[in-house]
C-alpha cells in the first residue's frame, strides 16, 4: 500500500532549499499531486510551523500518502484529500501556498490550466504557487535527456509532455499570477514560483 519513488530521495533536499526561501514561515500549504506521500513527509518534518495538506486524484496514491502519514504521526501533516485540479470545487477554500511537484509533464494540459485557475482562487495577493519539474525554455538549449524524456512521455500518452515555460507564463497571467522566481535544479529540472497579484 505504501509506495516509494526513488527520485524523491534525490530531489527532496534541493526542493526544500527553495521552499525555505519562498514559503511563508507558517500557514497552510496545499500540495497538489502528492504521489507516494514521501515529499509530504519530508516537507512536514522540515517545516514544523507549516501545516502540510497533501492531495491526489488517484485512490492508490491517497492510500500510500495516508500510510506514510500514519507511520510518521506528524501533527502538522494532514490526512490526504482527493483533488483533481480540473474539478469545479476543491476541498480547500484557502491556502497560504500551493506546491506541485512533477505533475505538469505527466498530466493533460487542461490539468495545468486548472491548477493555475484553482490556485488563483485559493491564494491571497503575494502568496505563491510553486512548481517543480522539467520544462523547456525559449532561447535555452534543452538537455538531450529532457528531449528524450519528452518523446517517451508523448509516446506513452499524447496528452503528456514537457511544457514550455512561456506557456505557463501565459496561463499564469490569465489567472492573476506572475512568475517571480526561477531556480535551476539538479537533473535538468526547474523550480518556478508564481505569485498571486
Image (cartoon, grey):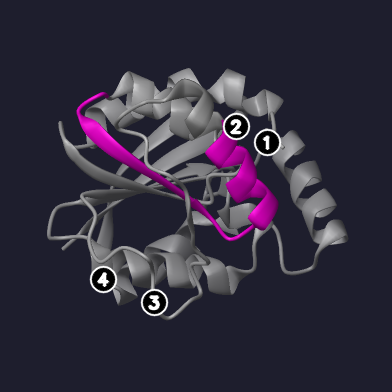
Q: Position of residue 166 (x, y in %)?
A: 46, 61
Q: Residue furthest left?
A: 125
Label 4 or label 2, whichever comes before in sequence order: 4
The residue pinned by badge 1 equals 143
| Mark 3 vs mark 4: in front | 3
Asked whether the beta carbons under mark 4 and mark 1 sit within 8 Å of each other, the answer is: no
Describe the element under mark 3 as helix, strand or loop: loop
Residue 57: name its quadrant: bottom right
How far apart marks 1 and 3 lie (CA) works out to 38 Å
In the picture provided, is 109 more to the left or to the right than 96? right
Give the numbered dot on residue 188: 2
Give the numbered dot on residue 170: none
| Mark 4 vs mark 2: in front | 4
Callout 2 environment at 10 Å: few (<14), some (14 to 19), or many (20+)? some
Describe the element under mark 1 as helix, strand or loop: loop
Q: Which residues are magenta?
A: 48-67
The residue pinned by badge 4 equals 121
Q: In terms of depth relative to the viewer, which is nearer, 103 or 139?
A: 103
> Residue, x 59% and y 27% (percent of image)?
8
53 in magenta = yes
One can see residue 84 in this view: yes
Q: Position of residue 114 (x, y in %)?
A: 45, 72
The residue pinned by badge 3 equals 89
Q: Residue furthest right?
A: 155
How far apart marks 3 and 4 lie (CA) works out to 10 Å
How far apart marks 4 and 2 lie (CA) works out to 31 Å
Callout 1 environment at 10 Å: few (<14), some (14 to 19), or many (20+)? some
Position of 169 relative to 65 (above/below)? below
Amino acid at each position: 500500500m505504501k509506495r516509494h519513488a526513488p527520485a524523491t530521495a534525490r530531489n527532496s533536499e534541493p526542493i526544500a532549499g527553495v521552499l525555505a526561501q519562498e514559503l511563508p514561515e507558517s500557514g497552510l500549504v496545499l500540495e497538489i499531486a502528492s504521489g507516494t506521500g514521501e515529499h509530504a513527509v519530508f516537507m512536514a518534518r522540515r517545516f514544523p510551523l507549516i501545516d502540510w495538506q497533501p492531495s491526489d486524484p488517484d485512490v492508490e496514491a491517497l492510500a500510500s500518502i495516508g500510510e506514510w502519514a500514519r507511520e510518521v504521526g506528524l501533527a502538522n501533516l494532514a490526512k490526504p484529500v482527493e483533488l483533481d485540479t480540473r474539478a469545479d470545487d476543491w476541498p480547500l477554500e484557502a491556502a497560504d501556498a500551493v506546491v506541485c511537484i512533477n505533475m505538469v509533464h505527466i498530466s493533460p494540459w487542461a490539468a495545468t490550466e486548472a491548477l493555475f485557475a484553482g490556485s488563483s482562487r485559493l491564494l491571497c495577493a503575494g502568496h505563491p504557487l510553486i512548481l517543480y519539474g522539467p520544462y523547456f525554455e525559449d532561447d535555452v538549449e534543452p538537455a538531450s535527456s529532457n528531449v528524450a524524456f519528452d518523446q517517451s512521455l508523448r509516446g506513452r500518452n499524447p496528452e503528456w509532455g514537457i511544457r514550455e515555460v512561456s506557456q505557463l507564463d501565459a496561463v499564469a497571467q490569465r489567472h492573476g499570477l506572475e512568475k517571480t522566481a526561477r531556480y535551476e535544479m539538479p537533473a535538468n529540472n526547474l523550480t518556478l514560483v508564481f505569485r498571486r497579484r
